[in-house]
Amino acid sequence: MYSEFCFSGVRGVYALVTKAIPSLALLVEDTTLAKCANAARNSMEDLGRLAAAPFLKDGSVASRVTALGYFYANGKASDLPMVKPLENDRTLVPKNDDPEAKWQCEVPKADGKENETKDIKDVGEFVRFCVVPAMKAR
């Protein structure tokens, strides 16, 4: 029924929202639509991953940590090869004067039972202590 609206990427999401939502009761029963929505979601994740990836290698430190922020929030274990090379990046993270916005991550204590706050000094630490553990947890 709604399979004609099943496109990949943004165009498919737009079509789904504008054409399918008025018939929400029918959408719940339509397994083709569920498959289409899942494909659109995966396509959007791929789009974000593809958009962030070039900035992991090139650009300013601000560009790199912004791209790493995408993987911190959305990356999966299968994306680890994209961020692992930055574990040795000793470029200092951008300075921030806002006391509420510090470069910190929660890391397990030596006993493994509790977490402690770790101050992050460089891009490599951000990858090792923040990004990689978040990606492995998904």
Image (cartoon, helix red, strand yellow):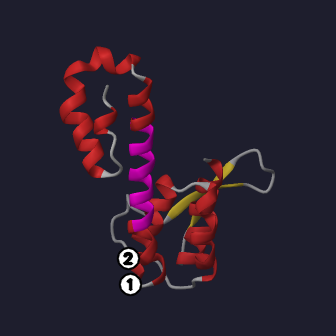
Q: Residue 42: in sight, yes or no?
A: yes
Could you tell me which secondary element the residue under label 2 belongs to? helix
Q: For mark 1, does the 10 Å Cα neighbourhood hold few (<14), some (14 to 19), or many (20 or more) residues?
A: few
Which three-letter amino acid code belongs to the residue tagged 2? Ser
Above or below: residue 99 compared with residue 25: below
Q: Quadrant of residue 58?
A: bottom left
Mark 1 touches mark 2? (CB < 8 Å): yes
Residue farthest to the right, as pictured: 111
Q: In this picture, which residue range is highlighted in magenta?
A: 37-50
Q: Quadrant of residue 119?
A: bottom right
Which three-letter amino acid code belongs to the residue tagged 1? Ser
Residue that mark 1 sits on: 60
- The residue shown at (38%, 44%) is 40
Q: Which mark is residue 63?
A: 2
Measuring from the top left, give residue 10's x and y in whole percent: 28, 51
- The residue shown at (20%, 31%) is 19
Measuring from the top left, give residue 98's x and y in whole percent: 33, 65
Q: Residue 94: in sight, yes or no?
A: no
- The residue shown at (36%, 49%) is 8
Measuring from the top left, give residue 49's x and y in whole percent: 45, 62
- The residue shown at (34%, 40%) is 6
Q: Is residue 122 left or right of residue 58?
A: right
